[in-house]
Each structure stands twice: as structure tokens, then as C-alpha cells.
Image (spheres, rainbow, N blue to C red):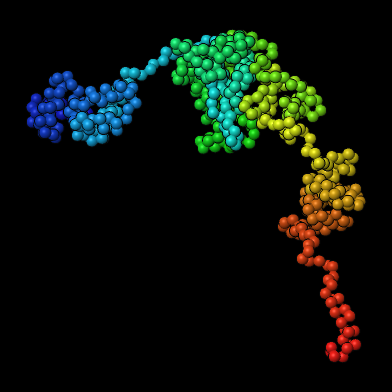
């Protein structure tokens, strides 16, 4: 096959000489080649275009196209090849793969779905969808992703279930993040929104209808199995999962608590809503300020009918009683009213914080006589443990030396050491002379070794000053003891007996 430059030289040589052979001598090719390109030019065909050659599979192409049309472009080339071989095709599988690929490309070109550009209107549409969230051990979480269409403002909320009360809480939190309520809310056809379809008409879940009526919005659903009809929020879900779910691509470490996931969601929203959007060339947070004037007014109080039953938190022990079982809630909600509901075998506790329903606790179902109390719900240390708290200036000066001082005080008090106050004053004086780091280190060593007598602290500090590491601790054991043994008494009385009886000598 000649290049375009070579073909142009051949044609120019023919135009110059008017002879096939002379042009072939000038162009350095055969005269038959010159004649072929001249004839192609004379018929109006581009000489650089390679003419298609007949192939062995050409006679079977109608069958190939029929199979692709019947399967809507899903049939594989290996299945097509089996059917063609049964019909007498003798070509290779490679030939069939090329023919099937060309036929599928032609099929997609004729059946490609074209979307009319959606020109959004401020305050009209919001879309929401769910994404698989990060795992907390074996527990799965979900990401609620909402997208305000005109301003491209996104809201991402981490949840632990996808029930109707959770949807009500997420909608309220989303609307309050928007600063108003849009006219329509578009989502998928999940059972919490659509119970069934009749004549392709979605039948709404009766539990979701009052929620939309309360906020003054209309909940709409897309066509079943057609995510392209809400592509904006689908893209928001994809980006949220890419950035928030720990994977090998983003190198995000695993989360240790649900609070860390919520914090990561807040950071993600601040980032994506603060940067310039590539479509609008403006930051979504900036456009939201303009769109808020077109949103409906938000109710003063959230929709609480779906949050469950109300319970009063005990003002002293920060617990609620459900089915004769006590469950703890964070101490900041002591004496307040909360909402409870069962999700399977889990008790979900929701509180209204700054006008927004927020899940504050989740417990496994228990039985009477077995209360569920979590230590993280209480600010104080667990019972039975006392933390040193200075009451005088001398105690405060001693405890400010460091954690070693606190450990020394606890161990010395447990041993009943005499003169603790004077030894504490000595440690404070040494800290002023030799530094708090060295004294704190020596106090920690003394606490581990159980050395609380006079002069022990100075001795340990002197030893540590001339050694790289801390002083090795040793305790008395049964193998080495200063107590004299009784082996010396084994011959007591035997010598006198020997003197009395000569026969025993």
C-alpha cells in the first residue's frame, strides 16, 4: 500500500509525461500501479482509500447481524462462531470476532441513546441516592447523597440503615443544609419510596407521602433500572464513594468509629462545595446563596412522626428504659426528650440537635436485668479508678511534673508510704534544679520498682544520669533471699550422741 505522498508523486509524474511507463520510471514503481491509481482518480474514488476485499465470512454476515439484533448486542463472538460453524463456515474464530465487533459497533450506532440537555431551574429539583459506605468491622454503612441540580450543592450523610425514619431524618438535615425545600425530589424506586408499579405508574409508599407533604415537596422516582435519568446524583455518589470509602487507590485508612465517618463526610462536603465546578465555573456554595431565594420555606421543627416513640432521659444516670431494660445515651442529653425505634434487633435513639434529628445511640436488644451501658456515654472515669486531682498548690506543682508523678503518687498511696507530702516537695525541688523530664522519668521508675523510701528518688536519678536507658527494676523473689536457711541445724544433737556411744564412732 502506497502512502499519500507516493500516490501524489505517481499522479504528478503521469500528468507530466502522459505515459504509464514513463511515469513509472520517474516514480520508481510498476506501470500497472500507475494505471490503477490513474483509473481510480478518473472514477472519482480516493486513491488512498483501500478498497474492501471479499472475505470468507461475507456470506454469513446477515446471520451475524440477525443474532446481534436478536440479543440486543449482548451475544458473544464465541457463540456466534459455534452457530456459523454449524452452518458450514470454515473460517477461524479470529475472523468471526472481527466481524462480530464490527457488527456490534454498527448496532450501537443505530441504537445509541441520546439525551436532551437538561436546563435546570433554580429551586426546582433535588436528587438523592444511596451509596455503599465504609465498613466498621463487620457492620455495613450507607452514604446518603443529595444533589441540588441548579447550584450543584451536595450533601453526604453517613447512616447505618435505610429505613423510612432514617430517610425522614436525612431529608430534614439535607433541607436545612440547603436553607430551604425544593419543589421536587427525585430518587430511585426503592421499597421505602415505591411499593409497586401498575401500568408503569409508580405506587408511592404511604409512609413516605406524609413526609413530603410536611415539607411541601413532591417526591418523584425515575424509570426502573434507568439510572441515566438522574445522572447528576449518580455522579455525586461515585465521587463520594471514591473519596470516602477506604480503597487501594485513595490510601484512606480504615475508620475506627462512626464519628470518624461523619467527620470525613463533613470534610468532603466542605471541599466539593467550596471548589469551582467545571460546568458552571462557580463554586456551589456561592450559587446556593442565590438559589435559596427560590426554595420553599423550611418548617421550624423537623418531622418527628417517623422517628418513633418518645422517651425522657434520666437526669442523673443518662439512661432510658425500653421494655424494662435500661439503655445509656450520651450524657449531654440527660434530662431531655429523645425518640426511640427498633430496627431489627437494634434500638435506634434519635435526638433533635439544633433543630435537626440526629442519631445519638444504637444498642443491641437486651433482656430485663441486663442493662446496656456504654462507657463512652459518660465523661467520668470508670468506677473503682481514681484520677489524681490536685487540691492545693503543692499537689498541683507535683502533678505538673508529668505522668510519672501521678503514677508515683498512686503507687505510693497504695503501699501506705509515710511522709508522702515531704517526698512530693523534694521531687518539686529536684525538678527545679535538674529539670522536670529527668524527675518525671525517675518517679515513673520508682513507681514501677516500688521504691518509696527517703533517698530512692535521688539514687534513681543518679543512676539514670550515667546510663543510656532507665534503671532496671528488680523485685525480691523466692530464688534469691537473705533469710538464712535451716541446713545448719541438721546436725544438732548428733555430736553429743556420738560422744555417748563409742560404738557409733
Q: Position of residue 234 (x, y in %)?
A: 50, 22
> Do we see residue 321 in this rendering?
yes
Residue at the spot x=62%, y=17% of the render?
Answer: 168
Could you say which is closer to the camera, residue 365 or residue 165?
365
Q: Position of residue 12 (x, y in %)?
A: 16, 26
> Do we see residue 352 in this rendering?
no
Horizontally, residue 396 falls left or right of residue 270, namely right
On screen, 417 above or below 219?
below
Q: Position of residue 56 (x, y in %)?
A: 18, 30
Horizontally, residue 190 falls left or right of residue 82, namely right
Q: Quadrant of residue 68?
A: top left
Horizontally, residue 408 falls left or right of residue 246, namely right
Q: Position of residue 475 (x, y in %)?
A: 79, 59
- How many numbered marks are there? 0
Quadrant holding the C terminus: bottom right
Residue at the spot x=72%, y=25% of the render?
Answer: 322
Residue at the extreme bottom of the image, as rendered: 502
Could you say which is closer to the camera, residue 419 or residue 323?
323
Residue at the spot x=26%, y=35% of the render?
Answer: 94
On screen, 251 above or below 132?
below
Horizontally, residue 187 falls left or right of residue 255, namely left
Quadrant holding the N terminus: top left
Q: Quadrant of residue 334?
A: top right
Could you say which is closer to the camera, residue 102 or residue 327?
327
On screen, 120 above or below 491?
above
Residue at the spot x=32%, y=20% of the render?
Answer: 109
Amino acid at each position: 500500500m502506497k502512502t499519500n505522498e507516493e500516490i501524489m508523486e505517481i499522479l504528478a509524474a503521469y500528468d507530466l509525461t502522459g505515459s504509464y511507463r514513463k511515469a513509472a520510471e520517474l516514480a520508481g514503481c510498476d506501470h500497472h500501479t500507475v494505471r490503477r491509481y490513474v483509473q481510480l482518480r478518473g472514477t472519482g474514488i480516493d486513491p488512498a482509500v483501500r478498497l474492501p476485499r471479499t472475505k470468507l465470512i461475507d456470506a454469513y454476515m446477515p446471520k451475524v447481524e440477525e443474532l446481534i439484533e436478536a440479543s440486543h448486542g449482548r451475544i458473544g463472538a464465541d457463540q456466534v462462531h459455534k452457530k456459523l460453524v454449524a452452518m458450514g463456515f470454515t473460517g477461524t474464530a479470529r475472523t468471526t470476532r472481527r466481524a462480530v465487533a464490527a457488527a456490534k459497533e454498527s448496532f450501537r450506532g443505530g441504537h445509541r441513546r441520546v439525551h436532551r440537555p437538561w436546563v435546570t431551574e433554580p429551586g426546582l429539583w433535588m436528587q438523592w441516592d444511596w451509596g455503599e459506605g465504609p465498613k466498621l468491622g463487620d457492620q455495613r454503612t450507607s452514604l446518603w447523597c443529595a444533589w441540588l441540580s441548579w447550584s450543584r450543592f451536595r450533601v453526604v450523610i453517613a447512616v447505618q440503615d435505610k429505613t423510612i425514619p432514617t430517610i425522614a431524618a436525612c431529608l430534614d438535615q439535607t433541607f436545612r443544609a440547603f436553607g430551604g425545600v425544593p419543589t421536587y425530589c427525585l430518587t430511585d424506586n426503592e421499597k421505602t419510596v415505591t411499593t409497586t408499579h401498575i401500568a408503569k405508574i409508580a405506587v408511592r409508599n404511604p409512609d413516605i407521602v406524609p413526609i413530603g407533604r410536611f415539607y411541601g415537596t413532591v417526591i418523584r422516582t425515575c424509570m426502573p433500572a434507568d439510572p441515566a435519568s438522574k445522572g447528576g446524583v449518580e455522579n455525586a455518589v461515585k465521587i463520594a464513594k471514591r473519596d470516602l470509602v477506604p480503597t487501594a487507590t485513595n490510601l484512606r485508612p480504615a475508620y475506627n468509629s462512626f464519628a470518624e465517618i461523619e467527620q470525613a463526610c463533613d470534610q468532603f462536603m466542605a471541599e466539593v462545595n467550596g471548589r469551582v465546578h467545571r460546568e458552571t465555573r462557580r463554586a456551589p456554595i456561592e450559587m446556593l446563596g442565590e438559589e435559596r431565594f427560590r426554595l420553599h420555606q423550611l418548617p421550624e421543627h423537623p418531622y418527628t412522626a417517623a422517628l418513633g416513640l418518645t422517651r425522657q432521659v434520666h437526669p442523673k444516670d443518662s439512661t432510658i428504659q425500653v421494655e424494662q431494660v435500661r439503655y445509656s445515651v450520651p450524657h449531654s442529653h440527660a434530662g431531655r426528650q429523645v425518640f426511640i425505634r427498633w430496627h431489627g434487633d437494634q434500638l435506634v435513639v434519635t435526638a433533635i440537635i439544633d433543630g435537626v434529628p440526629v442519631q445519638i445511640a444504637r444498642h443491641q436488644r437486651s433482656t430485663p436485668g441486663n442493662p446496656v451501658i456504654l462507657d463512652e456515654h459518660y465523661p467520668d472515669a470508670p468506677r473503682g479508678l481514681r484520677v489524681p486531682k490536685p487540691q492545693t498548690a503543692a499537689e498541683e506543682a507535683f502533678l505538673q511534673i508529668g505522668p510519672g508523678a501521678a503514677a508515683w503518687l498512686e503507687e505510693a498511696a497504695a503501699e501506705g508510704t509515710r511522709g508522702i507530702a515531704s517526698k512530693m516537695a523534694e521531687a518539686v525541688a529536684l525538678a527545679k534544679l535538674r529539670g522536670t523530664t529527668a524527675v518525671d522519668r525517675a518517679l515513673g521508675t520508682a513507681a514501677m520498682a516500688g521504691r518509696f523510701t527517703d533517698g530512692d528518688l535521688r539514687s534513681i536519678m543518679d543512676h539514670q544520669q550515667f546510663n543510656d536507658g532507665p534503671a532496671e527494676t528488680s523485685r525480691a523473689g523466692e530464688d534469691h533471699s537473705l533469710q538464712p536457711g535451716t541446713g545448719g541445724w541438721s546436725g544438732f544433737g548428733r555430736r553429743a550422741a556420738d560422744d555417748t556411744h563409742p560404738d557409733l564412732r
